[in-house]
Image (tube, grey):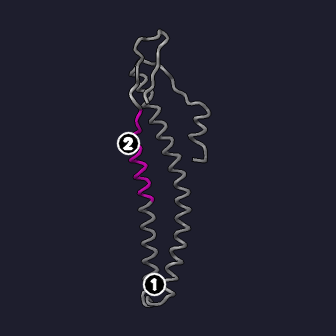
Amino acid sequence: MALRCVSAQQRKHPKTLKPVRPNAGVEIAYYKALMALIDEMDASLTYWLKASYRKHEATIAQDSVADELQKVMNRLTVRWRSLFDDRARKMAETQAGKWQKGADTSLMSKLKQAGFAVKFRPSKAVTDVLFSPGI
């Protein structure tokens, strides 16, 4: 959907702004941060499972080893869920701010190119939604 605006002089041909598109660089940065967190979790799981396996390698045919590995997985699952919950919230807040800044900058640039001199200030409601703890 394009943004249309008619000046006070009621132009015959209203100006149509180019669409505001999301910043691909911000999306790539978010993807890299998320993948780094997943890689960190993978390395941790691999390390602790190998360590537990090596500890019980001599008795590998017994059920107690499988039970021990399951206990290790359960502890790591609790730990990583907690870390993902904490870090995901921080990442989302950071990314929301970057996406908002990028969209605002792009819109202002397009308005300026179309000949508008507008100082964009988001309302309190917009700011509250973007930076609310519920994101």
Q: Quadrant of residue 107?
A: top left
Q: Position of residue 41 (x, y in %)?
A: 45, 64
Q: Position of residue 78 (x, y in %)?
A: 56, 68
Q: Position of residue 132 (x, y in %)?
A: 60, 43
> Dot 1, how many residues are within 10 Å of its Cα: few (below 14), some (14-19), or many (20+)?
few
Kindly state the secondary structure of the residue where label 1 is placed: helix
Question: Which span of residues is magenta-colored?
Answer: 20-37
Q: Earlier in the sequence, mark 1 or mark 2?
A: 2
Q: Residue at x 45, y 34 (%)?
A: 103
Kindly state the secondary structure of the residue where label 2 is placed: helix
- Side of 134 relative to 57 (left or right): right
Q: Quadrant of residue 115?
A: top left
In which quadrant will I find the N terminus?
Answer: top left
Q: Residue at x 44, y 81 (%)?
A: 53
**Looking at the rendered structure, which numbered label has been put on residue 24?**
2
Query: What residue does disc 1 label?
Result: 55
